[in-house]
Amino acid sequence: DGGITQSPKYLFRKEGQNVTLSCEQNLNHDAMYWYRQDPGQGLRLIYYSQIVNDFQKGDIAEGYSVSREKKESFPLTVTSAQKNPTAFYLCASSGSNQPQHFGDGTRLSIL
Amino acid sequence: GENVEQHPSTLSVQEGDSAVIKCTYSDSASNYFPWYKQELGKGPQLIIDIRSNVGEKKDQRIAVTLNKTAKHFSLHITETQPEDSAVYFCAAAIYGNNRLAFGKGNQVVVIP
């Protein structure tokens, strides 16, 4: 089946630790996105990438980093500089002039 | 940047009744408006979208209307069913520009 796979579904971070969230798509989409979702806040854009080896900051990029070495993969690292990382993280992808499609998210919590 | 607002934040309807969710946007350049449905613990799923060259679009029990002059668009769900209970998000963008601005979501509860 074509789709977007996010892993893991649940992730726990210790103080001072970096963690990486995985996002893989087999839809042959050029563009990929990371959003953060907090209760009552809607979806806020962290980073997006329109093509391999290129990415841009979204509205809340501080404390996060990404890479886009392959078309199908767009991992997100939550660094220790992100002081409030507890949230639901959503990855999306889209083809040219096509709607964004989302994965089922990773829930990150602090230990 | 674009600012999208949704009203009401929570909506309860009796099964079989209609539900209407309204969104307003600020950027008159926006011309693409998708709606997403999110069930608990899942990612949002696109349910319908509209471009500004039309005023209404329907897909079975779901319809979206757009008023460009007033800068608002609405989602209409008719003959609601319990499986329609979810959080619904509206968004706005300039078509072809991949940066969607999302509203904060509406919790819809369908009461059997």
Image: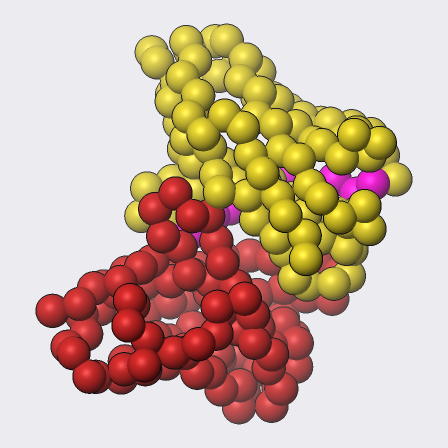
Residue B49 among magenta residues: yes
Q: Main secondary structure of the magenta part?
A: strand
- Residue A7 at x, y = what percent? 32, 70
State the residue at coordinates (71%, 44%). Answer: B26
- Residue B63 at x, y = what percent? 67, 26
- Chain corresponding to yellow in the figure: B
- Residue at the extreme right of the image, as rendered: B53
Task: From the viewer's perspective, tell me whether residue A79 is left or right of residue A44.
Answer: left
Relative to A79, does residue B48 appear above or below in the rendering? above
State the residue at coordinates (42%, 26%). Answer: B10
The quarter of the picture where the C terminus of chain B appears is top left
Q: What color was chain A assigned in the picture?
A: red
Task: From the viewer's perspective, tell me whether residue B20 is left or right of residue B53.
Answer: left
Relative to A8, does residue B110 appear above or below in the rendering? above
State the residue at coordinates (55%, 57%). Answer: A101
Residue A65 among magenta residues: no
Residue range (magenta): B43-52
- What's the colour scheme? by chain
Query: Residue B60 versus residue A105: which sits nearer the camera?
Result: A105
- Residue B56 at x, y = what percent? 78, 28
One can see residue A17 in this view: yes
State the residue at coordinates (42%, 48%). Answer: A41
Query: Residue A103 versus residue A59: which sits nearer the camera?
Result: A59
Relative to B65, does residue A103 appear above or below in the rendering? below
One can see residue B36 in this view: no
**How many numbered marks does the figure carry?**
0
